[in-house]
Amino acid sequence: MPDRPRRLTHDPKRLAAITAGVGVVLTAAASWSTARVDANSEHRLLVQQTKQAAAVLSTAILVLEEPLSTALSIQAAAGRAGDRAAFTRFMSTYVGTGKPFVSASLWTRQGDRVSQLATTGATPALTTTSPAGRSYALHAFEVKSPSVRQVTAGGQPRIAWALADPGSGLAVYAESALPADRHAPVARDSAYANLDYAIYLGPRATDAALSTTDVDPSSLPLRGDTARESIPLGDTTLILVATPNEHLGSTQSRWLPLGLLLGGLLLTAIAAIAARRLLRDRSDAEADAATITALFEQVETLYAQQRDLFERLQRALLPHGLPAIPALESASQYVAGAQGTEIGGDWYSLVALDEHRFGFVVGDVSGRGVDTVAVMAQARFTVRAYLLDGQSPATALEKCSHQFDISTDGHLTTVITGVGDVRTGEVTMANAGHLPPFLLDGEIRPVDVPPGRPLGTGPAHYDETTIAMPPGSTLFCFTDGLVERRGESIDVGLDRLAATLSRAGERSVAELVTHAVDTLRNPDAPDDIAALALRWEGPR
Amino acid sequence: MAEFVTTTGAAAPRLAVSGDLDISGVEEFLSHAGRLLDAGTTAIEIDLAGVTFIDSSGLGALVRLQKSATAGGQQLRLANVPRPVTRILDLTGLTELFEERPDS
């Protein structure tokens, strides 16, 4: 026998103490590193949700700017004197209680003189007769984008917007009301209800620049783990700072460190007690090598169980490719193009929208390289954000079509997106120039989702197609890298995919995706491939 | 690789493309086509008869060209579009974008 066991057996209490000591250290280490993993994944989720919230906020800004620029175009077309009646009539849709603005004015500039042609709604905080109003108006004519400020009217904070057309010398000025205490709670059923936020107008997040927040303004700045996004707003920026007000990830990952700590301590106690009892029960323990060996084996088994528990739980914590959605078996794969080519712009997303509904997206940004990936990230977050915000697939694509322009970013983006319900198997899809998904329900055929124009071609309209997936059927979405080959018609590639899927037989969706990608990918082809398969198990 | 032949002198100058119109040939394509637009005629024609393959970057180039033509009040006509390319335009929802409008 080696020395160590013999020495330890002299004193049952000592062995128990060592066992307990080692156990406590292992447990503490496991629990600490699990807590770290949880904190990291929490931060990732926070950054992702903050980006999505910023995308929604950018859209809200566009919605506010739109009537101002339309009003200005109408006025500029009427000449240097504008058309006061038309201005009041047009802005009345947007000014008043429960509308975007509390007041709107039409200004004109001649040289250094600025005067007001018309006004509608509440008394504006800034008028062209005050020095502050005059210098602000002159500034608005200098900058090309809308000029945005925070102003107060009778102690009431407001956001002021001024949009000027130097050609006609006309400017449209409007004010939106902010809550008096700058406190604006998030609706409980919103996709962002688990974030506390503070929005600042201007380049710095100071108390004076605070626009709105859902927490008590006196408790700012937000503390703890925070994420920050800047959103361009006219000649300034909005800063969105967010912090989670509840655990963002699964409850499992939240309680895991504590569970591990308690479980580990329990196992340690059992090991220590077992060690003591085994020794005391045997008066001739010193001589009985077999007992010592058994004792150490037992202690080792307990430690091994503890380590295994720790490792398995940690693996469960690491971010998975796809979220688990009840009654939906899903699998996905991304394959980069041939070695030596730059990274491409294919992506897929699967999100749980509520208890029963899920949203999915498969898309492809044309081109390769870093700027392609940047457009891909923007498209990915924007479509997801609209789906999470409750928009239908066609509306989500339509809203996205306003945000991408090939003339400025150089890319076309094709997207297939859908929303499904696991209670009924109904899936509603809309298509921006993407290849049709395949439905596998005994037969294999492309689903006719009539394509609207790809994102980047300009504002577009999209139609929706709803299919009822039979229980056990699979929807297979993919990008063109899977089917496109030089020198042959795309239909040959689509037929080859159908044949490959039919040979995959009764496999799991994970095997189905792997089989299709392994069979059809061409190691020398430069194009990347994304594939997403969703199998509806049937009503529960 | 794609090859390009420009014919001017006719009412609508024409750019004939042959080979693979893909990411590797897009820049050259846009620079040839851009020169045709710069000539300022009311319409230009892109002859796709010899195109054997078009990828999403190639489609993107056609869309960019169409947008710059429209912005300059010019018309872009696609001529002799081979069947496989027509099929791709249909599948990507782009057919309507290249259809000639009777009023223009």
Image: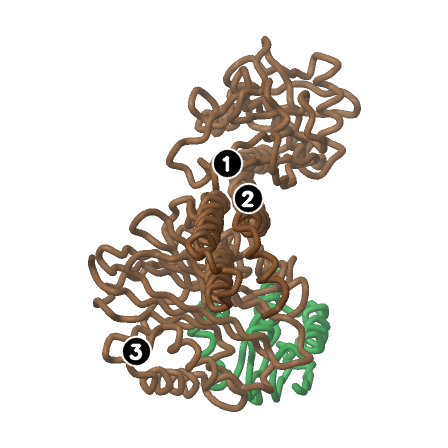
Chain colours: A brown, B green
Name the element at disc 1.
strand
Instruction: Sort mark 3 into few (<14), some (14-19) or many (20+) by Cα contacts within 10 Å.
Output: some
Name the element at disc 2.
helix
Residues under numbered marks 2 and 1 in contact, where contact means CB atoms less than 8 Å apart: yes
Q: Amino acid under label 2? A: Leu
Name the element at disc 3.
strand
Q: Position of residue A26 (x, y in %)?
A: 57, 52
* Relative to A265, B61 lies left or right: right
Q: Amino acid under label 3? A: Arg
Badge 3 or badge 2: first in the primary sequence: 2
Which residue is pictured at 23% across the width and 55% down the height?
A423
Which residue is pictured at 70% across the width and 35% down the height?
A235
Which residue is pictured at 61% across the width and 40% down the height?
A227
Q: Position of residue B44 (x, y in %)?
A: 62, 74
Q: Quadrant of residue A78?
A: top right
Who is closer to the viewer here, A73 or A301?
Answer: A301
Residue farthest to the right? A112
Residues under numbered marks 3 and 2 in contact, where contact means CB atoms less than 8 Å apart: no
Whether callout 2 and callout 1 share a subunit is answered: yes
Identify the residue position indicated by label 3 in the image.
Answer: A445
Q: Chain of mark 3?
A: A
* Mark 3 and mark 2: Cα distance apart in space: 40 Å
The answer to whether residue A51 of the structure is visible from this angle is: no
Which residue is pictured at 35% across the width and 59% down the height?
A463
Residues under numbered marks 3 and 1 in contact, where contact means CB atoms less than 8 Å apart: no
Who is closer to the viewer here, A67 or A318?
Answer: A318
Q: Position of residue A397 (x, y in %)?
A: 44, 55
* Relative to A48, B86 lies left or right: left
Q: Amino acid under label 1? A: Leu
Identify the residue position indicated by label 1 in the image.
Answer: A195
Instruction: Sort mark 2 into few (<14), some (14-19) or many (20+) by Cα contacts within 10 Å.
Output: many
Identify the residue position indicated by label 2 in the image.
Answer: A46
